[in-house]
Amino acid sequence: MYFAGIDIGSRTIELVVVDEAGEVVSSLQADTGFDPMTEAKRLTEEVTFDRIMATGYGRNLFEISFDAPTVTEIKAHARGARAIFPEAQTVLDIGGQDSKAIALFENGKVKKFEMNDRCAAGTGKFLEIMARTLGFAIDAFGREALKAVRELSISSMCTVFAESEVTSLIAKGNDRLEIALGLHASVIRRAASMISRVSSGGDIVFTGGVAKNPCMRRLLEERLGRRVLVPEDPQSVGAFGAALLAGE
């Protein structure tokens, strides 16, 4: 039998299919777009599976449209991260819409978590808007920020006010690389605070699209003094976890 997990996020949709041994046999991704259910349907038609479980921002819509069970992103990312890194005790998931810090019991079950889903601050959306304001492609934003000699402090974490502050700093002739590093540091301070409230030690598994950002990874390790582990495909960890749970 084959089991599928679909993670319908605010920016992308991931679909992962595993076999009975939990090995990945298919992995697909698409932009969420303005009609996520049409995209989700298209992805499911490209693979073969016996059972599917949904997670992510649009999981409830998927449940209604496809009569499929759902699981929270917290449980899905915890399950996926633990399968990839069996000793994992802490998971940080930063996606486009929200960020989550998750502590795990020895058996892999969720022990405690904190979540930021009230505003864009501390999420991929914040970084995306700031990258555009500074004239960087989002895929290059982290690499460019690491070239800065020093960090320029950003006082506001509200996306609207931070964008205004960045525009003002540019107008005053400040180095945009230093501004970029300061913006990354402001997100990391928020993430590190969440992690510290749920977990006090050990490695951190970093999942979600923002985990691809090398500046975020380095600053997180430096701030907390803990090793940060990034899966080969951090965006698919939630879908992978959902697929494993579908099989269980």
Image (cartoon, rainbow, N blue to C red):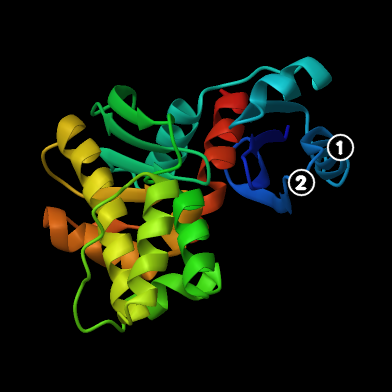
Labels 2 & 1 near each other (Cβ < 8 A): yes
Task: Give the distance between the C-alpha atoms of the residues marked 2 and 1, in whole angstroms.
Answer: 9 Å
- Residue 186: tell me if it is visible: yes
**Residue 5 pos. (x, y %):** 65, 35
Residue located beneath label 2 in the image = 33
In this rendering, position of residue 99 left or right of residue 18: left
Asked which secondary structure carries label 2, the reply is: loop
Image quarter for residue 116?
Answer: top left
In this rendering, position of residue 195 left or right of residue 54: left
Question: Which badge, 2 or 1, comes first in the chain's sequence?
Answer: 2
Front position in the image: 131 or 222? 131
- The amino acid type found where label 2 is placed reads Gly
Name the quadrant of the C terminus: top right
Residue located beneath label 1 in the image = 38
Is 113 situated above or below 212? above
**Residue 180 pos. (x, y %):** 35, 70
